[in-house]
Image: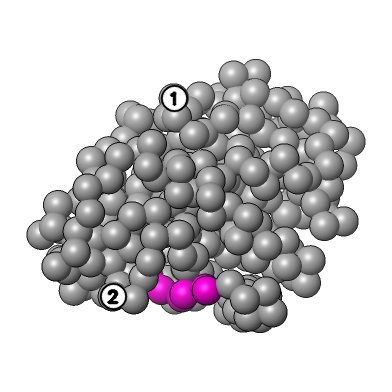
């Protein structure tokens, strides 16, 4: 994997003129942020050595470089997933490449099912902690000490100051912003009512099929991290709604402006 990381990084570095210090991973239906950035370089994942191509609707599969809020940024417009058959090691590849290119702070967005009473479809939730229920971990296998420690500390994965800034920005803009725990599952099925009950009772407020692998790798490499979820459907005890991927994309698209306002504010003040 180290050779793949080096090849990917070298290929990109030869084609860009800036050094990004911030990276953003856009989740399902959240492409609108990419449209707001001043993009100078655009690469399809198909072009980049070692990069898989996402095949899920709502994930564009492009790596973008440019400026956003006067910061040099790298944007992953779409991600690939464990349920697509990719290994956890491969899921961590983009984050490894980010760090090699100079990124120090990673922003992750996702679409998630909400389980906390009081959540509404379209709400936003800042991730304060996570529960990894994917059945595996991107750090399993031989550790490369040049990338990070064998046993990274996970007591404070999501940066407290960035979460504080997000709360300030949301309040200033009249945006409802929750803070909670994100549970990551393998997918690709949505949860049963019993699974929603279980997840909420063990401490999760939202559930999705991404984010945690990237977060673990980012933490392993010493990156500062912020994650935010758009609540696209509900699995609250006594009120579980049927959901489809198209509905998730629709809600994410409608809620994207609120998420962008929060992210823009955090990036501007970070």
Provide residue 196's location: percent of width, then percent of height: 19, 61
Q: Residue at coordinates 77% horizontally, 39% vertically from top-left?
A: 65
First to last magenta residue range: 176-181
Helix, strand or loop status at disc 2: loop
Q: Are marks 1 and 2 in contact (CB under 8 Å)?
A: no
In the figure, is residue 233 to the left or right of 267? left
The secondary structure making up most of the magenta span is strand
Residue at x 39%, y 45% (from the top left corner): 248
Residue 216 in view (yes/no): no
| Residue that label 2 marks | 117
Give the image quarter of residue 221: bottom right
Identify residue for label 1: 55
* Whether residue 156 is visible: yes
Q: Are there few (<14), some (14-19), or many (20+) residues within 10 Å of tag 1?
A: some
Identify which residue is drawn at 51% across, 38% down.
79
Q: Secondary structure at mark 1?
A: loop
Residue 75 in percent (x, y) is at 68, 43
Q: Quadrant of residue 174?
A: bottom right
- Residue 214 in the figure: left or right of residue 259: left
Q: Is residue 125 above or below residue 5?
A: below
């Amino acid at each position: 994997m180290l050779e793949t990381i080096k090849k990917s990084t070298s290929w990109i570095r030869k084609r860009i003129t800036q050094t990004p210090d911030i990276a953003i991973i856009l989740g399902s239906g959240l492409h609108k942020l990419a449209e707001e950035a001043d993009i100078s370089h655009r690469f399809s994942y198909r072009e980049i050595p070692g990069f898989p191509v996402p095949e899920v609707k709502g994930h564009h599969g492009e790596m973008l470089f440019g400026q956003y809020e006067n910061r040099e940024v790298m944007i992953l417009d779409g991600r690939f997933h464990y349920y697509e058959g990719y290994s956890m090691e491969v899921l961590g590849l983009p984050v490894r490449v980010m760090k090699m290119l100079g990124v120090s702070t990673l922003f992750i967005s996702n679409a998630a099912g909400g389980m906390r009473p009081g959540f509404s479809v379209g709400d936003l939730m800042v991730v304060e902690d996570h529960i990894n229920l994917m059945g595996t971990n991107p750090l399993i296998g031989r550790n490369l000490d040049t990338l990070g420690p064998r046993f990274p500390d996970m007591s404070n994965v999501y940066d407290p100051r960035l979460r504080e800034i997000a709360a300030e920005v949301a309040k200033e803009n009249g945006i409802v912003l929750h803070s909670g725990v994100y549970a990551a599952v393998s997918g690709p099925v949505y949860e049963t009512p019993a699974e929603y009950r279980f997840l909420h009772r063990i401490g999760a407020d939202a559930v999705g099929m991404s984010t945690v692998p990237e977060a673990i790798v980012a933490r392993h490499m010493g990156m500062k991290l912020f994650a935010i979820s758009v609540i696209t459907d509900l699995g609250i005890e006594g009120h579980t709604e049927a959901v489809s991927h198209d509905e998730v994309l629709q809600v994410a698209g409608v809620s994207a402006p609120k998420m962008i306002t929060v992210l823009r504010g955090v990036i501007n003040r970070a």
